[in-house]
Image (cartoon, rainbow, N blue to C red):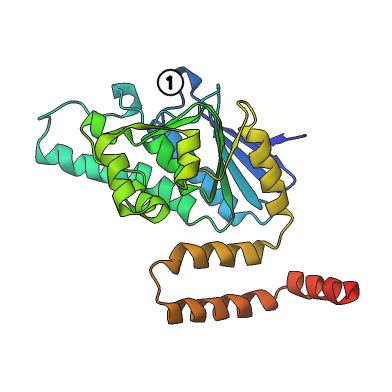
Amino acid sequence: MPTTPDEAPTPSLLIERDAGVVTLTLCRPERRNAIDIPLWHALTRALREIAERDDDRALVLTGAGGTFCAGGDLSESGGGSSGPGAGGGDLLEAATTAMRETVGVACLALHELPKPAIAAVEGTAAGAGANLAFGCDLVVAARDARFGEVFVRRALPVDSGGSWLLPRLVGLQRAKQLAFFGDWLDAAEAERIGLVNQRVEPGGALALAQAWAQRLAAASPDALACIKRDLNLGLSRSFDEALEAEARSLAECVTKPAFAETLAAFRKSR
């Protein structure tokens, strides 16, 4: 399948475009694709660009070297903590700001992307890497992939949106179990509890994710944007509010050329 590399790729983030599908590949295989500060920033820039480009219709997020992402890079070179007690309140404020401006903006850009996003997971998805996968709309995983909310093992709280995502995906008690113990989940268990949509043979996650993305790229982008938005907000709305939102989305979509085209095709087929 032909691809067009981004004109100015960031070394740690490979961007490829093909027929409306954008594939973002986390590319730090020597660190198992652990995300450092430059990669967080690159990811944010890429997601914001995809949101603005009409010819970008669907996103696939994956990792290089047979693994998805080992989480945030906690080494000093990656921007990790300099150790306990350093700086006191200044360190706390700096860490809070750094999280907002790196992890926070990237995860929000993924969540608010008005286009469908699919994670293609091979190998390990740990910590922030797991939550990046779960932050996508769909997850395809190799049968030997594994997921871990490993934050507690590092004496850290859940981040990258996991505290919001997990209860909505698996329920509150299961979310607490995953976060409290930090145990690894294999792909079969992740699929069983609703964190993975489909398992494939090792090495096949990207191919299936891109095939799904091609199908989505052929659908109405306006309809998909409305569907994604209304589903994401559905749990925070009353039933009346959901019906009202659906009515507004309907009014938004029926004014678009795609609706007229599909309606004409439907009537012709009848």
Residue 7 visible in this rendered orientation of the protein: no
Residue 37 visible in this rendered orientation of the protein: yes
x and y percentages locating residue 54 in the rendered image: 67, 57
* Numbered disc total: 1
**What type is the residue that disc 1 sits on?**
Arg
Quadrant of res 14: top right
Quadrant of res 92: top left
**Which structural element holds mark 1?**
helix
Identify the residue at image location x=50%, y=21%: 29
Quadrant of res 240: bottom left
Q: Residues within 10 Å of mark 1 (few under 14, many from 20)?
A: some
Question: Vertically, is 8 above or below 99?
Answer: above
Question: Vertically, is 137 above or below 62?
Answer: below
Task: Specify whether 161 is left or right of 133.
Answer: left
- Image quadrant where one finds the C terminus: bottom right
x and y percentages locating residue 152 in the rendered image: 24, 34
x and y percentages locating residue 125 in the rendered image: 44, 32
Task: Specify whether 165 is left or right of 210.
Answer: left
Q: Residue furthest top?
A: 30
Task: Specify whether 48 is left or right of 262.
Answer: left
Identify the residue at image location x=48%, y=43%: 192
Task: Specify whether 154 is left or right of 139.
Answer: left
- In depth, the one of 251 and 263 nearer the eye is 263
Identify the residue at image location x=62%, y=26%: 203
x and y percentages locating residue 31 in the rendered image: 43, 21
Question: Vertically, is 254 above or below 143?
Answer: below
Residue on which disc 1 sits: 31
- Image quadrant where one finds the N terminus: top right
Identify the residue at image location x=20%, y=26%: 82
